[in-house]
Image (cartoon, rainbow, N blue to C red):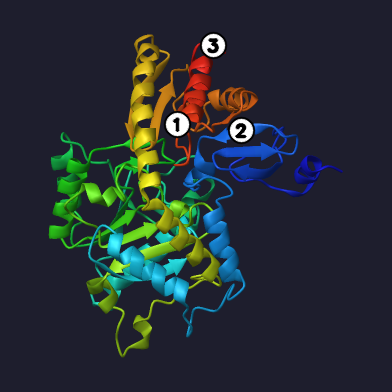
Amino acid sequence: MDLQKKDEKYIWHPYTHQKNRLPAIPIVRGEKSTLIDENGNQYIDAVSSWWVNIHGHGNKFIAKKIYEQAKKLQQVIFTGFTHAPAVELAEKLLKVLPGNFSKIFYSDNGSTATEVALKIAIQYWSNVGDLKRNKILAFHNSYHGDTFGAMSVSERGIYTFAFQDKLFEVIFIDTPTGENLGQLKDEIEKYKNEIACIIYEPLLQGAGGMLMYQPEDLNELLHFLKEEKIICIADEVLTGFYRVGKFFAGNYMKEKSDIICLSKALTGGTMALGVTACTQEIYDAFVSDDKTKTLFHGHSFTANPLACTAALASLELIKKDKCLKSIENIMLHHQKFHKQLLTFKENNIIKNIRKTGTIIAFEICTSEKDDYLNNISNSFTPFCMKRGVYLRSMGNTIYIMPPYCITSKELKKIYGVILEFLEGG
């Protein structure tokens, strides 16, 4: 039995409609921006393998660092022990994070990073004796992960439908605009002494459909929330590490978050790692003679030495001029592609063209609803794959989020395939 048939027999793939699903393509290796299957077919990875692989595939520098660490220490319990990669990574992250953070809590992925943040924020108010502060604020169209706490603070929709009655209550508001800020403040005013925290994806709601909003509007809302002593949690799992043009989305705002969550690009796409950082003020509420004020949370692979090593290597690469110039190159090419798309917008073939940093997105106009279940995705990905490009739309939302090592030639090929699809194939 070949690999593809064994996969069909044994594997349950994520976010995949199971009935009559297309056979999974066996990928045997990756080289920079390219994925290569068992038959030698090559595909440009235009979505960075679910937004994580910023340095491309098979990065020799990161691989060497992981190998060297694996010979020394692969894993150790992180209660009562520590190790150099975890300490060094925490020290380096705290120097670059957008805010006055003082402590790093490690976990396994983006969902767990947001779970930790929510637990810290809720327990903070319990620890300081303000039990009325137990409500959570979040944005419509948000997505913070697939564990239960993360689902609870995410948009109620297709991702969470089967679990609606198991999710805890959350106050949802719209993302801020110049027009609705007054209304949002009035809504928050009703509950301001009961709200423990707000969790938000700054400037870009990824899984919600690559929805973008403006830093000046978010900054004004954060200023208001901070005046009301509401803990601000920035979910930068996607937006961190230059995805939106700056090192972190938080760098666009004067007002900074109290807690920040990281994952995805953190290790350069090599392995799972989550980070939740907080300010000294929040951390101090957990330092007490009362042992019940301890944060009772942890994971078996907390601060895994290999993952921390990969993150350190990725950080080293991302600061190099070569990487920064590549990011600028992607942004310039996206600008040119945006101009090419305008004709299709004028002819009502597409709508809502938007871009930020290394991401460009738009919707294809169809007779169906604009959402994840729109059938355009059934034809779009296979069309692109046949032409050597891997793009995975979210329903009729088309987006490009390439690894930073991508070449101008590869970008032009991606654009060309999309334009061919829009022209009718």
What label sits on residue 232 in the rendered view? none
Residues packed near mark 3 inside 10 Å, few (<14), some (14 to 19) or many (20 plus)? few
Residue at the bottom extreme of this rendering: 289
Name the residue type under label 1. Answer: Tyr
What label sits on residue 399 in the rendered view? 1
The residue located at (58%, 28%) in the rendering is: 381
In this figure, which residue is indicated by the disc labeled 2?
Answer: 43
Q: Are marks 1 and 2 in contact (CB under 8 Å)?
A: no
The earlier-in-sequence mark between 2 and 3 is 2
Name the residue type under label 3. Answer: Gly
Q: CA distance from mark 1 to mark 3?
A: 18 Å
Count of all numbered marks drawn on residues in the image: 3
SS at badge 2? strand
350 lies left or right of 60: left
Of 101 and 210, nearer the camera is: 101
The N terminus is located in which quarter? Answer: top right
SS at badge 1? strand
In this figure, which residue is indicated by the disc labeled 3?
Answer: 424
Up-down: is 289 above or below 107? below
The earlier-in-sequence mark between 1 and 2 is 2
Of 145 and 350, nearer the camera is: 350
Observer able to see residue 330? yes
* Residue 174 picture location, percent across and down: 27, 41
The earlier-in-sequence mark between 1 and 3 is 1
